Image: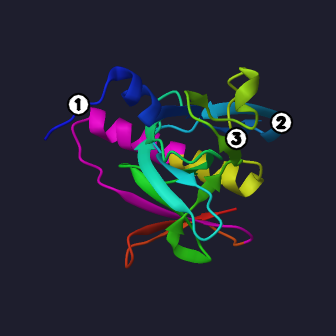
């Protein structure tokens, strides 16, 4: 026998988690860095929504950011009276390219935001204080992560430029290397190495 869920049951059965990711970029002019910063959206990047669990963490789903860095995902309720412990990762990976850490060649850069503990359901704007209604943007806290998402943004801009010319640029891999001199392209592994 098929039993339909009422709209009230459906409302309890899931909730929407939304947010916005940005990266912090160092401003420069023709003479180099000038000491100010600008925030930019992390565009078109992969996003993973996780539940922090005592035994092992559960991937609840994936989505991607929009052009303005916003994202949204419907999470199914697990009927746990203590609620869910939700955290979200934004990953330096998109259709245009991937930015990996030179020390962890196969792992793209990922920034894990704060864990929101014991969420009881209902729509959530994902930030450090989801109950205050301020809808804050989440930003990586390290220069290394901000640089990785800046590189990703440049890959996206280049991809869009070539796509507008009717070219298919394909997926580009970039390795961000902190403390390494020189930026170069290695054709044998089809990867750009970027100095940090």
Q: Is residue 32 magenta?
A: no
Residue 66: x and y in percent read: 45, 32
Asked if marks 3 and 1 touch (Cβ < 8 Å), the reply is no
- Which residue is located at x 65 percent, y 47 percent? 82
Q: Identify which residue, 80 or 102, lies in the foreground.
A: 80
Residue 71 visible from this viewpoint: no
Disc on res. 139: 3
Q: Nearer the viewer, mark 2 or mark 1?
A: 1
Q: Which residues are magenta?
A: 153-179
Quadrant assignment, res 109: bottom right
Residue 153: x and y in percent read: 52, 43
- Which residue is located at x 40 percent, y 22 percent? 8
Q: Nearer the viewer, mark 3 or mark 1?
A: 1
Disc on res. 4: 1
Tell me if 42 is positioned left or right of 168 in this view. Answer: right
Helix, strand or loop under label 1: loop
| C-alpha distance separating marks 2 and 1 | 61 Å
Q: Is residue 156 magenta?
A: yes
């Amino acid at each position: 026998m098929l039993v339909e869920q009422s709209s009230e049951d459906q409302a309890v059965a899931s909730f929407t988690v939304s947010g916005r990711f940005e990266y912090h970029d160092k401003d420069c002019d023709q003479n180099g860095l000038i000491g100010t910063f600008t925030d930019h959206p992390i565009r078109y990047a992969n996003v993973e929504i996780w539940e922090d669990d005592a035994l092992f963490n559960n991937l609840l789903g994936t989505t991607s950011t929009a052009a303005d860095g916003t994202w949204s995902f419907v999470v199914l309720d697990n009927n746990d009276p203590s609620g869910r412990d939700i955290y979200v990762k934004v990953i330096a990976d998109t259709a245009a390219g991937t930015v990996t850490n030179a020390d962890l060649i196969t792992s793209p850069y990922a920034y894990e935001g704060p864990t929101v503990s014991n969420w009881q359901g209902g729509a959530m704007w994902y930030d450090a204080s989801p109950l205050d209604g301020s809808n804050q943007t989440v930003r990586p806290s390290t220069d290394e992560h901000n640089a990785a998402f800046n590189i990703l943004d440049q890959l996206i801009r280049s991809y869009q430029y070539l796509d507008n010319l009717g070219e298919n640029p394909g997926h580009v891999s970039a390795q961000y290397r902190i403390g390494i001199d020189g930026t170069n392209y290695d054709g044998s592994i089809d990867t750009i190495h970027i100095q940090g």
